[in-house]
Amino acid sequence: MGNILVLAEVSQDKDLTKPSIQVLKTARNIADQVGGNLVSVLIGSNLNNSKTQEQFGSCGVDKVILIDDAVLENYNSEIYTKLFIKVVKEQNPDYIFGINSLIGMDLLPAASFHTNGGLAMDCTEIALEGSSLTVTKTMYSNKAIVKVKFNDNFKPKLAAFRPNTLMPKDVIAKTTEVITEKANIDQNSIRQKIREVSKSKSKEVSLTEASIIISGGRAMANWDNYKILFETAEILGAAVGASRAAVDSGYAPHSMQVGQTGKTVSPQLYIACGISGAIQHFAGMGSSKVIVAINKDPNAPIFKKCDYGIVDDLFKVVPVLKEELCKLLGKECATAK
Ligand SMILES: Cc1cc2nc3c(=O)[nH]c(=O)nc-3n(C[C@H](O)[C@H](O)[C@H](O)COP(=O)(O)OP(=O)(O)OC[C@H]3O[C@@H](n4cnc5c(N)ncnc54)[C@H](O)[C@@H]3O)c2cc1C
């Protein structure tokens, strides 16, 4: 037997995120192989609706524990950790899976600490070898791929998965049992107070969930020039990213930074425009399925790492790319300037 607990996450619209669905379906497949139950926990506010139940059901989840409370509106590490650990101790699962997101990176190591379980973060694959669970992860800025086998003497086994890397098989939908709980937190016992939260008003595609990303580097030269990337992204349903040089130069906000000190992304297609291909940038996007580079320097390091390369000025190439995509996809397209 191997019971699995999955820490799920929802978007601002309270839909299960794509990476959550990937992890839940993967967990269902593993639970079926080891003969265990799949329980999920979701912590937040305004969660208790039939849409959520349906979404968990379509991922084959047996039971979901919704900790739904107005006090959980904004993420508070201390409160969320307390609530998650409580569920972990009550459920006593053999495996705990989550996403390598900001929340997953906070809560899974905490659960490992409180249970003395084995932990692997930023995994890209999972497999059962006999009765042993192994996960694959990259190291040294994607230069090495390691397989981690969990030590069976430790329970639970915890793994956080990089968004968009799991390719789960289809699962059979279930009627998920929903248990709704309140936070029941004594606010006086909480040391961490959230004074203010600034939420992005943007409805743009989230970088970590995007299947296609178009990123601009220092060569973009200013924020206005990102317009051509956003216009092209809109046609493709893509997200727009940036290199650290572009962010440090004030051309783009840090929320768009991809790389070692920015976001880790794994899209199906990554288009790097005017990005040299430094190892720290590669650390955040090296697991992209297909990498296309547009750079006017034929000796730029990115050309050693990409699948397709275009040696030219991005300000010539991107407008043409946009026009051709419009024709190909049959979309209305303003003439590129
Ligand atoms: C500890 C640490 C952490 C870091 N973390 C990150 C990180 O998270 N993310 C990150 O990106 N970097 C990170 N860096 C910085 C990294 O080392 C590089 O400096 C950075 O990635 C370079 O960004 P860039 O490629 O946009 O700029 P550059 O290296 O300046 O490259 C610009 C490229 O644009 C090309 N170019 C110029 N004009 C055009 C044009 N018109 N058309 C086409 N091509 C053009 C040039 O040929 C050049 O290759 C980190 C560094 C350190 C030390």
Image (cartoon, helix red, strand yellow):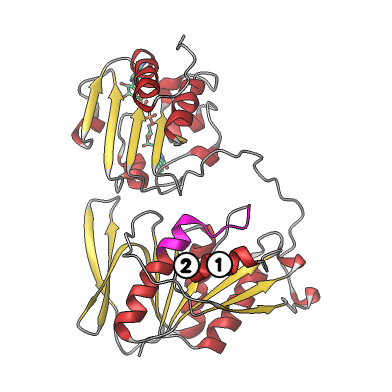
Measured as percent of width and height from the top left, residue 80 is found at 63, 70
Position of the N terminus, as image quadrant, is: bottom left
Say which amino acid is labelled 1.
Answer: Glu
Q: Secondary structure at mark 2?
A: helix
Say which amino acid is labelled 2.
Answer: Ser
Circle on res. 58: 2
Residue 210, by quadrant, is top left
Residue at x-position 54% and y-position 60%: 16
Above or below, comparing residue 269 to residue 335 in the picture: below
Q: Secondary structure at mark 1?
A: helix
Measured as percent of width and height from the top left, residue 176 is found at 53, 77
Residue 269, by quadrant, is top left
Instruction: Check if residue 154 falls in the magenta segment.
Output: no
Asked whether the viewer can see residue 106, the reply is no
Measured as percent of width and height from the top left, residue 3 is found at 42, 85
Foreground of the two, 271 or 61: 61
Q: Is residue 97 left or right of residue 193?
A: left
Above or below, comparing residue 203 to residue 324 in the picture: below
Residue at x-position 40% and y-position 37%: 213
Contact (Cβ within 8 Å) of mark 2 with mark 1: yes
Q: Label 2 neighbourhood size at 10 Å, few (<14), some (14-19), many (20+)?
A: some
Q: Which residues are magenta?
A: 13-22
Above or below, comparing residue 18 to residue 53 in the picture: above
Numbered label tally: 2
Q: Is residue 294 left or right of residue 258?
A: left
Asked whether the viewer can see residue 99, the reply is yes
Q: Is residue 43 left or right of residue 297?
A: right
